[in-house]
Image (cartoon, helix red, strand yellow):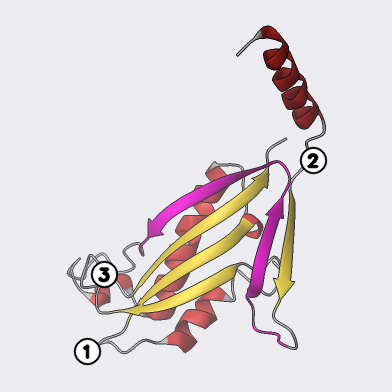
Amino acid sequence: MNFRTAAVVGALLATTHAGTTHAEVIRHPIPNSTFPIAQAVQVTGNATTYYVSGQVPPVANKDADPQSREAYGDTKIQTVGVLNRIKGILEGLGLTMGDVVKMQVFLVHNASAPMDFKAFMEGYTQFFGGSQPNLPARSVVGVAALANPGFLVEIEVIAVKDAK
């Protein structure tokens, strides 16, 4: 690359960065619905994206076998435990649950443990849709099993924060 080309490219890059806007997160609600998720979430501008690995529930009953459901509780207890773990991770990064733009939920659904979506929603709405109105786009998937036979819930999230 010759000097003139390098100067033009440098000027273009400088102009691009000088005009960089702050991040804007636009949450598109589901039309005619009060269901506590966004239909889509749009992120524009200068943002940092955080990918939080799947989190599993903490032990709720230390006296129970750590490979049992009794150790981790029912779907609602596990959901609240997992979301509290995610909340702690986000806070450690300077974020809040309101910065979550995408959530993927894995709920065990098999013959011995049918998916309890209602209990999941009871736990989920303690974090989204009430006093915290920033709703994420979300998927819920039924899976045959998770890494520990006692786990009924695993959740991973993507959060976005203005990079300023």
Label 1 packing within 10 angstroms: few (<14), some (14-19), many (20+): few
Q: Residue at x 74, y 61 (%)?
A: 26
User: For this view, does 29 lie left or right of residue 119?
Assistant: right
Label 3 packing within 10 angstroms: few (<14), some (14-19), many (20+): some
Q: Which residues are magenta?
A: 33-56
Callout 2 amino acid: Thr
In which quarter of the view is residue 128 placed?
Answer: bottom right
Which secondary structure lies at badge 1?
A: loop
User: For this view, does 50 lie left or right of residue 56?
Assistant: right
Identify residue for label 3.
146
Identify residue for label 2.
21
Distance from Cα at disc 1 to Cα at disc 3: 13 Å
In the picture, the disc for residue 112 is 1
Q: Position of residue 144 (x, y in %)?
A: 25, 79
- Asked whether 97 or 104 is in front, the reply is 104
> In the rendered view, would you say 61 is above or below 111?
above
Callout 3 amino acid: Leu
